[in-house]
Image: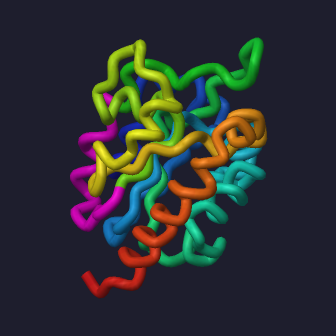
Amino acid sequence: MSLFDDIKADPENSEYTKQGIDPIFVTPKTAKILIIGQAPGLKVQQTGIMFNDASGDRLREWLGISKEEFYDSGDIAVLPMDFYYPGKGKSGDLPPRKGIAEKWHPKLLAEMPNIQLTILVGSYSQRYYLQLKSSATMTKTIKNWQQYWPQYFPIVHPSPRNNIWLAKNPWFEQEVIPTLQKRVRDILNSKS
């Protein structure tokens, strides 16, 4: 059985499996860049395609890559903190379920030996992978991205909901994004 089948068969995911909803992640063995986000949105769950929404368009723009490179090259992996849409909350989607990343990420990461860069999208992945205290703010984490370089690169979620954050923090798109784009391009152009 594959990890995909194991995740579907996990009792924690039985409600989704009963409804015919598959776990959403993309982990090609050839991947060089890994994007770890929070959880699929409703549109992504309905289409089964990661970042198939306005957030995805902005993310690809930030990375400086085309849709073809993102989806078809085998160089990009996308692994959310939860494989299923968690539902709607008061101010956006609910957080990813606890324990999912701890249980499944190590197994999935072991199948991708060529990862050279892990992009941490949003506070859930940043807290988990950078082992941040709950008091750590996303803005401070992203401002100090060099601390996590070259393995990790923390960024804000590209959701349109973060337009206010982007307006208040113009340094992100002016200074951080060009560095990210260069690193992504260097990795994608490398032969290894």
Residue 164 visible in the snapshot: yes
Image quarter of residue 183: bottom left
**Residue at 41% across / 45% down in the picture?**
5
Image color mode: rainbow
Residue 104 locus on image (x, y percent): 33, 36
- The correct choice, above or below, for 73 with respect to 115 in the image is below
In reply to whether residue 44 is colored magenta, the answer given is: no
Numbered label tally = 0
Q: Is residue 53 left or right of residue 18?
A: right
Q: Nearer the viewer, residue 111 or 115?
A: 115
Q: Is residue 29 left or right of residue 154?
A: left
**Residue at 77% across / 51% down in the picture?**
54
Residue 191 locus on image (x, y percent): 29, 87
Image quarter of residue 52: bottom right
Q: Nearer the viewer, residue 176 or 189?
A: 176
**Residue at 36% across / 74% down in the picture?**
187
- The correct choice, above or below, for 146 with respect to 30 in the image is above
Residue 168 locus on image (x, y percent): 70, 36
The residues colored magenta run 102-117
Image quarter of residue 68: bottom right
Quarter of the picture containing the C terminus is bottom left
Q: Nearer the viewer, residue 9 or 140?
A: 140
Residue 138 locus on image (x, y percent): 50, 29
**Residue at 62% across / 25% down in the picture?**
86
Q: Nearer the viewer, residue 164 or 24?
A: 164
Residue 1 visible in the snapshot: no
- The correct choice, above or below, for 37 with respect to 74 in the image is above
Q: Is residue 26 left or right of residue 117?
A: right
